Image (tube, grey):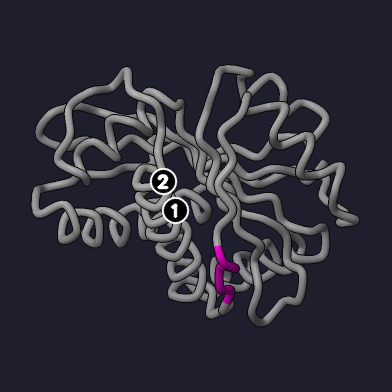
Amino acid sequence: MAILTPAQIDALGELGNIGASHAATTLSQMLMGQIEMTVPSVEIVDLADIYKHVTDDLSALVIFEMQGEIEHGGYVIFLMPLSSAMRMTNTMLGMTDEEREINEMDESALNEIGNIMVSAFLDATAELLGLVMLPSPPILVIDMGHAAIEQLLAEVAMDVNEVVFFHTKLVCDQYAINGDLLMLPEMTTLARILEMMDQLLKSHI
C-alpha cells in the first residue's frame, strides 16, 4: 500500500477542494440555486479494506474510466446512498416524492450529476498537476455499494491496489448530502500522480 506523506495528503486535499469548487459552480448553475460543496477529508485505503469504507446499503454509483494522457488510467466512481441520489434528482426534476421508483429521467439526471462531479475533479488534476485525464461515458449502477465495486474490479483486468476517497459534503437550500468520489487509479497512474505532487511540492518550497 502506498504510504502518503502529510504533504501529499494535503496536496490531495487541495486537489479535492479545487474539484469540489468547480463542481459546486456547475451544479449551482444547473439547479439555479446556491450549492456549496466541500471535501472535509481525503484518505487512501488498501483495496482489500474497501469493505470497511463502503457499506452494502443500496446506492447509486456512476462509474467512469479515466482516459486521456494515461491509457487505462483506472476508474473514478461517484457514490451516493440511493436516498440522497433521489433527493438530488428530485431537485433537478422539480419533484418531491422520495419513495417513488427510480425511472429513466432519474437515471439521466444521476449520470449528469456524476459527469459534473468527475469532470470537475479531473479538471482539478489538470489544473494542479498538468495531467490531462478525461472521463469515459458514464455507467450507472444501482446496487449495494461494496458489492458493485467488487463486481467492477472482478470484470476488469486492471492492476488497482489502492482507492483514494474524496469524502464530499454537498449543501443546498433544502438539505445536505454526503457522498464519496472514489478514484481507483491503476498502479502506475497512482505512482505518476504522487510523483507529480512531489514535484509540485518541491517547487513551492
The residue that appears at 43% across and 46% down in the rendered structure is 107
The residue that appears at 38% across and 33% down in the rendered structure is 85
Q: Which mark is residue 189?
A: none
User: 48 and 63: which one is in front?
Assistant: 63
How far apart in space, not on screen, are marks 2 and 1 (Cα)? 11 Å
Which of the 4 image quarters holds residue 54?
top right
User: In this figure, which residue is indicated by the disc labeled 1?
Assistant: 111
The residue mark sitting in front, 2 or 1, is 2
Apparent side of residue 109 relative to residue 3 in the rendered image (left or right): left
Image coords of residue 13 (percent x, y): 46, 49
Q: Is residue 101 above or below residue 187?
A: above
**Amino acid type, callout 2:** Glu
As helix, strand or loop, the secondary structure at mark 2 comes to helix
Does the magenta-highlighted stretch encompass residue 79? no
Which of the 4 image quarters holds residue 38?
top left
User: 66 and 8: which one is in front?
Assistant: 66
How many residues crowd around disc 2 within 10 Å: few (fewer than 14), some, or many (20 or more)?
few
Image coords of residue 178 (percent x, y): 38, 29
Range covered by the magenta-colored residues: 133-137
As helix, strand or loop, the secondary structure at mark 1 comes to helix
Question: The N terminus is located in which quarter?
Answer: top right
Which of the 4 image quarters holds residue 164?
top right
User: 195 and 190: which one is in front?
Assistant: 190
Image coords of residue 84 (percent x, y): 35, 28
Q: Which mark is residue 104?
A: 2
**Amino acid type, callout 1:** Asn
The residue that appears at 55% across and 47% down in the rendered structure is 140
Mark 2 / mark 1, whichever is N-terminal: 2
Apparent side of residue 91 relative to residue 6 in the rendered image (left or right): left
Apparent side of residue 67 relative to residue 173 in the rendered image (left or right): right
Q: Is residue 85 above or below residue 92?
A: above
